[in-house]
Amino acid sequence: MQQSRKNQPLPIDEQSGADTSQPGSSAAGPWDLLVQPGPVMVTAIHAGHTIRPSLHPWLEIGNQERLREEDPLTDFFLPVGDTVFRANRSRFEFDLNRPAEKAVTVDPEDTWGLRIWNPDLPQEEIDASLRLHQRFYDLMAERVEAMIAEHGRILVLDIHSYNHRRNGADGTADPQSGSPDIDLGATTLDPDVYGGLLEQFAQGLRSRPVRGKSPDVRVNVRWEDGGNFPEWLHARYGDAACVITLEYKKIFMDEWGHEADILALQDLREGFHAGVAKARDWLAASSGSR
């Protein structure tokens, strides 16, 4: 596996092994990884939209409809992390938040009734995607273990977004009662160990107004778990890794027209910066008290 360069993003083409950050490269790698010293990892594993050319003939969903089910602009929050990871490819090429058996699926029942792939998608294409899926988990194991060895306890923030206007552009939005502006997935988090960090982080998120009011930030409202990635991290590293999944409601964009609200994005990012700063303080104090 190619090693990351400190303080420099490294896109890697996992099929060819080529370092596509070199001058003259014409292909973007499946992801970008930036490694810097520090205990905070931030990931946007559903931010990508591109799909490798060999898959295009088998794709059966339209571009706009596919984008609606991805998490565009979640990579806007990444720079606050020490180690940061951005998936460049669509979640439908390989879903990094699902186990391997569900990471590439031709069954619409696995994709909210949407037909993503032709059922005759060749097995060799599926296998190519699954190799990338495995390389991601190998890469995360390598990086997380290095961070834990250096810092003892680390924080992993996995950023996603969700639709709340599924009734159409002019339809009724989902009720606020079940649709917080930011839903913090903390299903693997031990409150006896990290409850203080979670509360400090949430306070930071709320501290910056969005469109003139404090965002509605709650914990474990919409999903039973954060997906395979946080579950895998918890099973493998336990309390050495505090994992929080952030689900941002798409109040920062038009989920049907795909136009971004830049001011809302900037407000949300300021809140994220404030939350991470509080979490860093908590980790430093916790490390000093052990």
Image (spheres, grey):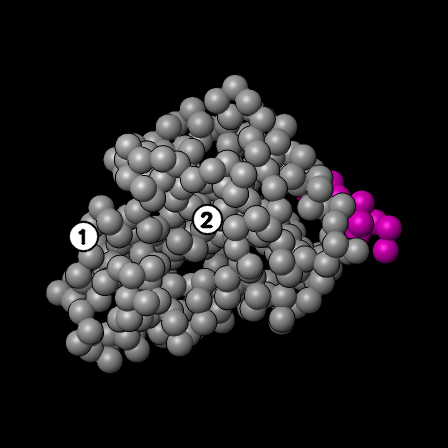
Q: Position of residue 264 (x, y in %)?
A: 44, 27
Determine which quarter of the picture holds residue 96.
bottom left
Q: Nearer the viewer, residue 209 or 224?
A: 224
Mark 1 Cα within 10 Å, few/some/many (few <14, many 20+)?
Answer: few
- Main SS of the magenta part reads helix
* 240 with respect to 108 (left or right): right
Q: Position of residue 258 (x, y in %)?
A: 28, 37
Determine which quarter of the picture holds residue 243.
bottom right
Mark 2 Cα within 10 Å, few/some/many (few <14, many 20+)?
Answer: many
| Residue 48 is covered by the magenta coloring | no
Reading the image, the residue beneath label 2 is 160
The residue lying at 52 percent from left, 50 percent from top is: 222
The residue lying at 72 percent from left, 58 percent from top is: 190
Reading the image, the residue beneath label 1 is 62
* 120 with respect to 14 (left or right): left
Q: Secondary structure at mark 1?
A: loop
Disc 2 vs disc 1: Cβ atoms closer than 8 Å? Answer: no
Q: Residue furthest left?
A: 57
Give me the disc on residue 89: none
- Residue type at mark 2 is His
Quarter of the N terminus within the rendering: bottom left
Residue extent of the magenta highlight: 279-290
* 255 with respect to 278 (left or right): left
**Visible in this render: residue 77?**
no
Quarter of the C terminus within the rendering: bottom right
Q: How many numbered marks are there?
A: 2
- Residue type at mark 1 is Gly
Residues at marks 2 and 1, CA–CA distance in whole angstroms? 21 Å
